[in-house]
Image (tube, grey):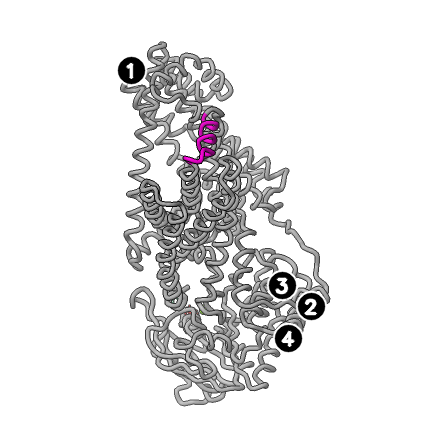
Amino acid sequence: MIKITNLSKSYNKGLVKAVDDLTLHVKPGEIFGFLGPNGAGKTTTIKMMVGLLTPDQGSISIAGIDILKNPVEAKQNIGYVPDNPDVYERLTGMEYLNFMADVYKVPAKERKERISNLLDMFNLTHAVGDLIKSYSHGMKQKIVLTGALLHNPAVWILDEPMVGLDPKSSHLLKEFMRKHCDQGNTVFFSTHVLEVAERLCDRIGIINNGKLIAMGTMDELRHRDQAHSLENIFLELTEI
Amino acid sequence: MKTFMSLLKITLNVHFGISALKYRFTKEKKRLWEPILIILSIIIGGGAILTLYSLLLLGVFMGGQTIGHPEIVLTFAFMATQLLVLIFGIFYIMSAFYFSNDLNILIPLPLKPAEVLGVKFIIILISEYLVALPMLLPAFIIYGIGTWADIFYWLKGLILVLMSPVFPLVIAAIFAILLMRFVNIRKSKDLMVVVGSLLGLFAGLGINILTQSLPQGNEEEFIKNLIMSNTGLIEAIGNRFPPSIWATLALSSSGWQGLGYFLLFVGFSIVLLAILLWLGNAFFYKGYLSGEEIRGKAKALSAEDVEKGASKASSPVIALFKREWKLFMRTPIYVMNGLAGMIMVPFFIILPFATKSEDMEVVTSLAKDPKYALIALFVSLGLMLFASSMNLISCTSISREGRTFWISKIIPASPRDQILAKLLHSSCLSLVALIIIALPLYFLLGILLYRLIIIVFIGFLVNVLINIVGLIVDLLRPKLEWNDPQEAIKQNLNAFLAMIISLIIMLIIGGVSILLLIKGVSEFFIYGILTLIVIVLLVPSYYGLLALANKKYNSLEI
Ligand SMILES: Nc1ncnc2c1ncn2[C@@H]1O[C@H](COP(=O)(O)OP(=O)(O)O)[C@@H](O)[C@H]1O
Ligand SMILES: [Mg+2]
């Protein structure tokens, strides 16, 4: 579903190598956790996957479509939520959702149903008539999430989705991710918390200093020979 | 004191973007020519204004000398500076004290309100020097040299010049603090923008009317007369605003009397400053926090409302257009700068005639004479086009998206659709502006209706072209990193660049029209040629725009 090959990206004319020759595949039906400490290159990778940054090298295909060659078609299959919910503050929640539904070409009937369901789930129904300006950080995050999932995309790409959500919303989102993947879709999300990845993911990729240093199920990672080479990284990623 | 200094240092750094500038010069190495260009144009433009202003002051000085009151130039400069600082100060202070984002970070820190307030005050004071020094120094120097003043004059004067913005700024700050404590206007930052813009507009109108009342020709003579007849007036204003008189007397009297007034001025400023800090400790945070709690709550939507609201569906271009429209109209600073500017320009041009009824009669009777009707028509077209070139809507169209630009990049709408929606939006507003400008011309000059429709049509075509140019400029170098919407539209060099290109386009069209008019070609032929020229320019720039959009929407990084 997601195919990343030899992806590289650097900032400031090559001074900072943020992503270095990254290759990974994610299969349909999988929740993939992209794990790494702060500054590892997670956000940079994700931004390239959704077309926000142009890679220096390498290719990315989402649901079989190359994001660089056919950006519009590829984007139709993606639901993306950034780590920072910068969103149109002077639209109401409802206006924003309708805008997203329009540009993703969600038919009227379907949109009605999905908007009510999602708003209900995230407990946003009461606020959706207000300007987004008046939302809390978590509410903004939830309205962005809702807008990203309206068109029922095959691939969800979420950057640190649990940060800033209250426990209930966070729990609901995790359940929702599981359900989505059980229908043969894919979720790709980044986190810097080992525990979150451990409990939720089918497979995990660990990135540090722009390089993918290990990939597999949690058990595989734990029991492989080089396991203790990961120990330091795990230590960094464990929340106390 | 140590915390105060480090707070001052960091705030100075953030406010004037020192680290960001360093980063840009040493690490990113992006568009270095830009700051140089800005500095250059400031030097040239500022120099010209400063020269004119100094000449005016010289006139006032010499006029004063003939009636034995050369110090009038000092009173004049101090008064003008302090009034200006007072008026601008209220807005600076409001936005720095109550509307800036850094307060959310500063309030939780273990600092006294007075310290935070003091730092913010110093920052504004420094910004005010940019206005105060060019206004005061020329008068100070002219008087000093003109009267062969002694060393004490220069010493006292330098301190007075540096202190001069303190007093009006403190008044503005005290006013702001008390206002915020008892009336809550934080809810409506937008209202402030509107009030501020209207104030600016009236100031502009006032200056316009004032310059209209200046007699043509011998201006120096006029200034002399003005001073002779108005020494009473200046004194009267000075009495309302005594510090400018104190400053004048401190400088023009010698010995103990001068020193006394000097101490009076300085002491008064310091006492006021102390009062401000005391008030700040008592009220500053309270006023800020009480504003923070209030939030305009729209009615909560029920489940049925949600279903109803979600039922309509539009095509992507229409959806993008609606987004553009709403975001523009709901941000007063955009409407004020983008639209009002465009509509106001022609009024400023018409006003000089309108305020002098004899002139107006001559113009209208000429315009109604069939012999000159065509000229009146093309002058009107020129006016419309000139106003259109003040259009800030298209050339800030991408910049205005700012940090939300990521949404435009991830949605599956083609760059073509996105840029078309923007072109549609700016051209719609252009059409509205054109019609608003056309109506008074129609009534004033009695232009025939069919001709009016034709020039509105040609004007609209040119506007589409200007909007395309604006979009191209903004695509090439959008300003996406800003925190306050005004940075996107007011502090955006794109507006300046687009305006220059628009002026060149208008020069071409104007030149061709004049040429054809002189040749006495039939009017329909002229319309035809103009339309043809615009279309010939329009087609390639349209395709150029689409190609550029395709490239830039993919390559712009955020
Ligand atoms: N806009 C940028 N300019 C320069 N360097 C950047 C920029 N964004 C990220 N970086 C650098 O790239 C590296 C990876 O950052 P990022 O992908 O945001 O990490 P993560 O999301 O894993 O915390 C970091 O070293 C960071 O400093
Ligand atoms: Mg990140």
Name the residue tied to disc 4: A110
Q: Nearer the viewer, residue A178 or B313?
A: B313
Residue on which the image places disc 2: B307
The answer to whether residue B11 is left or right of residue B279 is left
Mark 4 C-beta closer than 8 Å to ligand 2: no
Residue at 61 percent across and 59 percent down: it is: A92
Q: Amino acid at mark 4?
A: Glu
To the question of a shared chain for discs 3 and 4, the answer is: yes
Q: In terms of depth relative to the viewer, which is nearer, B395 or B236?
A: B395
Precedes in sequence: disc 3 or disc 4? 3
Q: Can you tell which mark lies on residue B147?
A: 1
Instruction: Please tell me how crowded label 3 is: few (under 14), some (14-19), or many (20+) other residues with Cα within 10 Å.
Output: many
**Residue at left offset 33%, top offset 76%:** A57
The range drawn in magenta is B359-372
Instruction: Tell me residue A48's x, y (percent).
Output: 41, 73
**What is the secondary structure assignment of the residue under circle 4?**
helix
